[in-house]
Image (tube, rainbow, N blue to C red):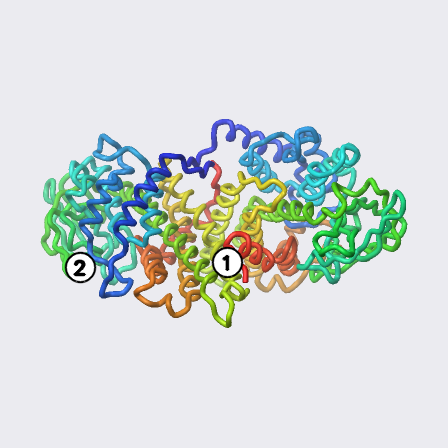
C-alpha cells in the first residue's frame, strides 16, 4: 500500500493541471464553475480542444485515440478536468457509445463513427428508456423489423437527454419478439435526420429543456448500423451502463462545487454581520460533507483499477449510489446557504448564459433551488439507486429470495 | 495511490487470524461490555510481534509501519477481540518519541504501558486540563483525576497528560503540556486518582504536543483497522443470516425491505474500507495531520454506527443477546467511535478551519 503519487504520476498531474487551466478558455470554465448551462457550441468547442490534444478519449483503445493510461492516470485526468471547471466531455459519446462501438462494433463502424464521436462532430443521444420500460429496461417495446437491407423501427423512447442537439441516437430495439425479454434486444445506431424520427421536449421542474421524447414511425435504418450481433444488445447495454455509473461519480466536480458554496457562505452574513460560513451548523455541515467526499474519492481511487471485461463492476453501483447522495446533499447546502434568496429563481432560458455573480441577488442564489430540484434526477437516472441496491444485494451479497 | 496488500501483509494477517482464532471472545457476566486485560492474549500478541510493529528498530520496535498495524488490527476486529492494542501503541509512540528505554519491555509484553488521557466529566481532548503537574527537576508531581483508564488496573506504567501549573525548572511555562511516566499507577474502578503522584517527565511543551499528535494518529490506525474488521464480520454475519433464516416459509433474503438495507450497509463498508486503508497509508508515510485523521475517524464512526445498528436490526432478537457475536461487534464499534474523541469533537475541530482552504486533496 502506498499513498503518495509516484514521481511520474505527479508529473502527469502537473501536466494535466497546466493544460486544463490554460488551454480551455476561462470564460467556459467560469460558466461551468458557476453552474451556468452551456450551449451546444460551447460543449463542442471545449471537446474539440481536448480531442486535438489527445485528452478527449484516453480510455478508448489506442488505435482510436486511447492513450493506454493507468487507471490512476485516468482518475487524475478526470479530476483535473473537473477541478478546473472544464465543460464535461459528452458522456453519450466518450463513455457510452464510443466504448461500445470500439469493443463490439465492426471495422466499418469504428472507422465511420469513432473519430467523429471523439471530436463531437457527431452528437449522440441515448435511446434506452421507454414509457413502460424504466427500471425494467428489458421490457422495452420499440421494435426493429428486418426488411431487405434495412431495419424498420417503430416505437417511442423517453428521457432522451439533449436529443434536441443530437445527430445520432444509439437505441435498444426489440429484434426478436418471441425470445425471453433480455435475449431479443439489439443495439442500433439511428440517424436523427431519418424520416419518421420526431423529438418532443419535456419541460423539467427547473423550467429547463434537457430531456425529450423521441418517436419512431417506420424509420428505415441501414442493416449495417446494428452493432455487434443481432439479439445481443442487452449485453452491450450492461457494459455501457457500468461505464455510465462509474462516470456519475464526478468527485472533482463535487469538490469544486462545495468549494464554491463555501465561498458563497463566506459572503452571506447573519444578523450580527458575521459570515454564515462561521456559523457552527454551516461549518459542521461543510466539514461533514468534506469528510464524506474524501471517503468517496479514495473509494473511486481504490476501485478504479478493477476491470471486468464486458461486465458491469458491482463497484460502479456503490459509487453511483454514494456519489448521487452526496451530490444531492451538496446542492441542498447551496439552497440552505442562499436562504431567503433561494425563493427567487433564475431560469436558464432568461439568463442567456450569464453568471450574474454581482447581481443584487446573485445568480448562484437564484440558481440554487432549480438546480437542487433538477438534481433529484441523479438518484433516478443511470439505473435508480434502488436498482443499484438490487444489483449489490444480488451480485455482491448473494441475497436472492 | 496503491491499495494492494502484498504477500507479507497477507502472511501477517494469516498469523494474527490464527492467533485470534485460538482466543475467541470468552463468556462474560457483563454481556458485550468491557473485558479486563487478558494476559494470555497479550503474550500471544507480543509473540506475534504486534506490539512493536510501527516503531523503529533503534527504539526497540520492529521497523514495520502503520500499514502493518492496520493489517493486524483488522484481524483483531474481525475476531471481535477486545484488547489494549490501540492504547499500547499510543503510549509506545510517546515512549519512542521520548527515546525512552521502557519501549523495549513494552514491545516484549513484559511491561504494560497505557496512556491516561481522559478525565471524568470533561469532553475529550488530548490534554483535557483538569490534571496539573508541578515540575520538580526531572520529575513532576501530579494532581487531579484521570479516568476512565480502561484495563488500567493491569498497567505497570502509565503515560499521563497534564498541564504545567506554575513556572518551573527548564524554562517550562504554565499551561504547557507535559507527558509524565508513572511507575506502578494505581487504578481503581477505572479511575486514577493522582493526588501527589510523582513520575518522570517524558516530553513537554511543543515536543509533547507533537508527540501526542503522532501517537493519536497511530492509535487511530489501530481503531480504524479494528472498526473495519468488526464491520466486515458484521456484514458477513448479516448476509449469511438473511440467506439462511426463514420466515413466512422463505429466506429473509426474499424481502427487499431487508436486502436493500443490507446493500446500504455494503456501501458503507466499502467507504470504510477505503478510508481505513487511506489513513494507514497516510500515517505510514508520516502524515499525522489531525485534520486528515479526524476526517477518516468521522467517516469510520458513521459507517460503523450504520453497519452496527443495521446488523442487529436485520438479525432480529438474536442480535441483542449476549450469546450471539453480532451485538458484540456493534458494542465494539460503539466504543471505538468514542475512543480518543468522538464525532462531535472531531467535527468541531474540522469545522473551525473550513474557511481556511478551498478543497480537501487526497492525491498528493
Q: Tag 1: Cα neighbours inside 10 Å, few (<14), some, or many (≥20)?
A: many
Q: Which residue is mark 2?
A: B191
Residue A149 screen position, x and y as percent: 88, 42
* x 23%, y 58%: residue: B35
As displayed, is residue A250 above or below residue A8?
below
* Disc 2 chain ID: B
The answer to whether residue B358 is visible is no
Residue A12 screen position, x and y as percent: 55, 29
As displayed, is residue B186 above or below residue A25?
below
Along the viewing direction, whichever of B12 and A17 lies nearer the viewer? B12
Residue A141 screen position, x and y as percent: 77, 58
Marks 2 and 1: which is nearer the front? 1
Along the viewing direction, whichever of B19 and A80 lies nearer the viewer? B19
Along the viewing direction, whichever of A54 and A253 lies nearer the viewer? A54
Comes first in the chain, label 2 or label 1:
2
* Numbered label attached to residue B300: none
Residue B262 screen position, x and y as percent: 49, 59
Amino acid at each position: 500500500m502506498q499513498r503518495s503519487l509516484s514521481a511520474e504520476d505527479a508529473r502527469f498531474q502537473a501536466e494535466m493541471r497546466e493544460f486544463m487551466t490554460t488551454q480551455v478558455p476561462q470564460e467556459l470554465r467560469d460558466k461551468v464553475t458557476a453552474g451556468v448551462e452551456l450551449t451546444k457550441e460551447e460543449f463542442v468547442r471545449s471537446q474539440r480542444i481536448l480531442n486535438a490534444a489527445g485528452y478527449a478519449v484516453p480510455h478508448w483503445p489506442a488505435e482510436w485515440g486511447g492513450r493506454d493510461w493507468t487507471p490512476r492516470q485516468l482518475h487524475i485526468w478526470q479530476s483535473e478536468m473537473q477541478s478546473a471547471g472544464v465543460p464535461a466531455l459528452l458522456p453519450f459519446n466518450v463513455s457510452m457509445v464510443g466504448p461500445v462501438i470500439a469493443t463490439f462494433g465492426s471495422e466499418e463502424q469504428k472507422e465511420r463513427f469513432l473519430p467523429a464521436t471523439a471530436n463531437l462532430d457527431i452528437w449522440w443521444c441515448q435511446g434506452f428508456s421507454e414509457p413502460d420500460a424504466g427500471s425494467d429496461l428489458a421490457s422495452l417495446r420499440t421494435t426493429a423489423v428486418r426488411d431487405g437491407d434495412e431495419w424498420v423501427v417503430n416505437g417511442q423512447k423517453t428521457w432522451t437527454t439533449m436529443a434536441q442537439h443530437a445527430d445520432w441516437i444509439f437505441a435498444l430495439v426489440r429484434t426478436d419478439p418471441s425470445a425471453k425479454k433480455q435475449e431479443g434486444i439489439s443495439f442500433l445506431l439511428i440517424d436523427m435526420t431519418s424520416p419518421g424520427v420526431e423529438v418532443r421536449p419535456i419541460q423539467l421542474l427547473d423550467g429547463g429543456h434537457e430531456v425529450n421524447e423521441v418517436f419512431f414511425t417506420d424509420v428505415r435504418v441501414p442493416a449495417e448500423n446494428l452493432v455487434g450481433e443481432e439479439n445481443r444488445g442487452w449485453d452491450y447495454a450492461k457494459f455501457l451502463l457500468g461505464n455510465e455509473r462509474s462516470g456519475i461519480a464526478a468527485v472533482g466536480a463535487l469538490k469544486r462545487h462545495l468549494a464554491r458554496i463555501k465561498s458563497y457562505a463566506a459572503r452571506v452574513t447573519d444578523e450580527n454581520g458575521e459570515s454564515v460560513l462561521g456559523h457552527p451548523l454551516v461549518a459542521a455541515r461543510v466539514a461533514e460533507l468534506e469528510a464524506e467526499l474524501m471517503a468517496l474519492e479514495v473509494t473511486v481511487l481504490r476501485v478504479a483499477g478493477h476491470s471486468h471485461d464486458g461486465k458491469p463492476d458491482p463497484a460502479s453501483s456503490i459509487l453511483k449510489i454514494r456519489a448521487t447522495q452526496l451530490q444531492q446533499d451538496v446542492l441542498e447546502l447551496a439552497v440552505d446557504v442562499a436562504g431567503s434568496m433561494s425563493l427567487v429563481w433564475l431560469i436558464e432560458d432568461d439568463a442567456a448564459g450569464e453568471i450574474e455573480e454581482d447581481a443584487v441577488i446573485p445568480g448562484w442564489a437564484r440558481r440554487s433551488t432549480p438546480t437542487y430540484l433538477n438534481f433529484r434526477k441523479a438518484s433516478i437516472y443511470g439505473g435508480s439507486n434502488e436498482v443499484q441496491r438490487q444489483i449489490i444485494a444480488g451480485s455482491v451479497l448473494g441475497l436472492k429470495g | 495511490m496503491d491499495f494492494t496488500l502484498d504477500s507479507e501483509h497477507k502472511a501477517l494477517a494469516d498469523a494474527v487470524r490464527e492467533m485470534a482464532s485460538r482466543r475467541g471472545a470468552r463468556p462474560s457476566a457483563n454481556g458485550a461490555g468491557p473485558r479486563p486485560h487478558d494476559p494470555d492474549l497479550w503474550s500471544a500478541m507480543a509473540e506475534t510481534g504486534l506490539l512493536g510493529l510501527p516503531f523503529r528498530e533503534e527504539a526497540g520496535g520492529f521497523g514495520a509501519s502503520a500499514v502493518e498495524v492496520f493489517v493486524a488490527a483488522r484481524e483483531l476486529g474481525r475476531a471481535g477481540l477486545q484488547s489494549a492494542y490501540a492504547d499500547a501503541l499510543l503510549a509506545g509512540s510517546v515512549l519512542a518519541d521520548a527515546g525512552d528505554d521502557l519501549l523495549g519491555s513494552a514491545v516484549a509484553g513484559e511491561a504494560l504501558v497505557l496512556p491516561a488521557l481522559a478525565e471524568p466529566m470533561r469532553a475529550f481532548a488530548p490534554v483535557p486540563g483538569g490534571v496539573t503537574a508541578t515540575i520538580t527537576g526531572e520529575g513532576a508531581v501530579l494532581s487531579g483525576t484521570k479516568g476512565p483508564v480502561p484495563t488500567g488496573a493491569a498497567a505497570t506504567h502509565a503515560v499521563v497528560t497534564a498541564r504545567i501549573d506554575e513556572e518551573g525548572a527548564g524554562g517550562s511555562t504554565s499551561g504547557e503540556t507535559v507527558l509524565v511516566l508513572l511507575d506502578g499507577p494505581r487504578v481503581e474502578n477505572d479511575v486514577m486518582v493522582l493526588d501527589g503522584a510523582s513520575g518522570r517527565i517524558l516530553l513537554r511543551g511543543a515536543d509533547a504536543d507533537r508527540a501526542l499528535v503522532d501517537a493519536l494518529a497511530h492509535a487511530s490506525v489501530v481503531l480504524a483497522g479494528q472498526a473495519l474488521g468488526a464491520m466486515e464480520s458484521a456484514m458477513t454475519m448479516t448476509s449469511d443470516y438473511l440467506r439462511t433464516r426463514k420466515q413466512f416459509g422463505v429466506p429473509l433474503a426474499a424481502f427487499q425491505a431487508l436486502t436493500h438495507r443490507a446493500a446500504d450497509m455494503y456501501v458503507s463498508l466499502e467507504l470504510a474500507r477505503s478510508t481505513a486503508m487511506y489513513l494507514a497509508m497516510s500515517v505510514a508515510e508520516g502524515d499525522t495531520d489531525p485534520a486528515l485523521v479526524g476526517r477518516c475517524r468521522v467517516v469510520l464512526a458513521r459507517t460503523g454506527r450504520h453497519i452496527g445498528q443495521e446488523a442487529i436490526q436485520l438479525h432480529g432478537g438474536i442480535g441483542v443477546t449476549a450469546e450471539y457475536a453480532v451485538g458484540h461487534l456493534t458494542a465494539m464499534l460503539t466504543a471505538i467511535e468514542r475512543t480518543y474523541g468522538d464525532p462531535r469533537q472531531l467535527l468541531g475541530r474540522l469545522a473551525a478551519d473550513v474557511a481556511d482552504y478551498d478543497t480537501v486533496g487526497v492525491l498528493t
